[in-house]
Image (tube, grey):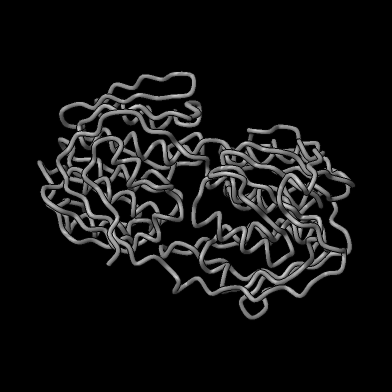
Amino acid sequence: MSVDAKQTGIRKKGSKAQPAPKAEDTSEAVSMDEVWIEGGRKLRGSVPVSGSKNATLPILAATLLAPGIYRFTNVPNLKDVSTMLELLSLFGVRSKRDDDHGLFVDSTNARNAEAPYELVKTMRASVYVLGPLLARFGEARVSLPGGCAWGPRPVDLHIKGMQKLGAEVEIEHGYIVARCDKLRGSHISFEISSVGATGNILMAAAVAEGETVIENAACEPEIEALAQFLVSTGVGIDGVGTPRLTIHGARHLHPADAAMIPDRIEAGTFLAAAVITGGDVEATNVEPDHLGAVFGKLEEAGAEVYVGERSVRVRAPDRPQALRVATAPYPGFPTDMQAQFMALLSVAGGTSVITDTIYQDRFTHVAELQRLGADIRVEGNTATVHGVPSLSGAPVMATDLRASAALILAGLVAQKETRVSRIYHLDRGYERIEEKLQGLGAAIRRVRV
């Protein structure tokens, strides 16, 4: 696709590379807002689901691969998206919103630069620039990632994949430093399925010489969306959506348009909110095929699930039933829904067991749910949740993105007022969630403190 720069409002520059601007340290520049909730209202109505954050971030990074102007639609207005665009600006990539959810990106004058700690530490997905930088410029210097506070998520698979493609990779003073004369196709077999590593290797292999095969590739819809986008830029990829991807590297890529897929985790969060409050909610702009495991558990909990072509309606029981939940790679139950279901099951009838097989220590929300009266015991990567008749509002603190959502769900059903602080985590992945919940009848508001 070729979009004229006049359409975008992005002014073209000459080919001479400009010095990379200093990255703003966003670690302290976070919102001090809180979300206050008066619980006890059943949610009812319809709510639109935004575009997927986890699909948008790697696709934005992929614009580094081919110079030109891209137009994206259904782009969520989120802190993580802003952070990725700020990171790309350090490489000379310019961007402009054309409405709330439209975005033009111009990578014509992209240059190599460092992905600094000040930005990368705020969002783990920043490591997605490693593959595109290496592929286009033959070298990359990317800080080791940061992001949510819970537990390490090592980048070993990213590094090993780049080495298999012919790069020399070292860790120097907290940075991943990769160099290559030319990337060459290879056979890469992941020990564990990794969304991030699959995406990064996909992008690097897009211009590698020859054929690359990725075994045990992640099958998540966000990876499928990235692969389809790369295909639209001129890459040949076989097996999209399966655990075996074959990438036929292309010498020349070109810009392409893309519409971001709906955010399946946001959709699942609203449906869980309907069940925890005993409500009746329809989520629109949804891809139902992406939510099969979540639907199954909602039905096991006693909810009625009605699936439309692009919508899902959930009618809740008087009280959800206890469940056994184990997270797993897609199409299994998503780890990004574990915290929300823990909140839901804290008021279920009976005892539930939740095991997170993806991350061993993703239970930082437990202590805060306990402050609301939840009866939860954790041993290793398994939580036992004894459902209680009701929760009681209290001040709580969000520790990561999905923990934020879990605390809001708990607050929706808790007696009296719940105040959730450190909601800058929430703004990384949920677009105007308090406004959307207000539209469903929740007594919720954002307060500057």
233 left or right of 322 in image:
right
Q: Residue at x 76, y 36 (%)?
A: 232
* Quadrant showing the C terminus: bottom left
Residue 317 can be seen in this image: yes
Q: Using the image as rendered, state which of residue 428 and residue 163 is in the foreground.
A: 428
Q: Is residue 47 left or right of residue 76?
A: left
The foreground one among 227 and 411 is: 411
**In the image shown, does 354 or 141 lie closer to the viewer?**
141
* Residue 165, x across and y down, in percent: 79, 55
Please say if 359 is above or below 212.
below
Residue sitting at x 38%, y 59%: 400
As drawn, the residue found furthest toward the bottom would be 173
Residue in the image at 23% along x and 61% along y: 396
Q: Position of residue 357 (x, y in %)?
A: 42, 48
Q: Left or right: where does residue 22 sit relative to residue 264? A: right
Question: Compared to 250, does 33 lie above or below?
Answer: below
Q: Quadrant of residue 284?
A: top left
Instruction: Please say whether residue 166 is visible from this viewpoint.
Output: no
Q: How many marks?
A: 0
On screen, 3 above or below 151?
Answer: above
Q: Is residue 285 left or right of residue 235?
A: left
Q: Which quadrant of the figure has residue 236? A: top right
Quadrant housing the N terminus:
top right
Q: Position of residue 433 (x, y in %)?
A: 36, 46
Residue at position x 14%, y 41% from top?
Answer: 40
**Whole-percent x and y of residue 208?**
84, 50
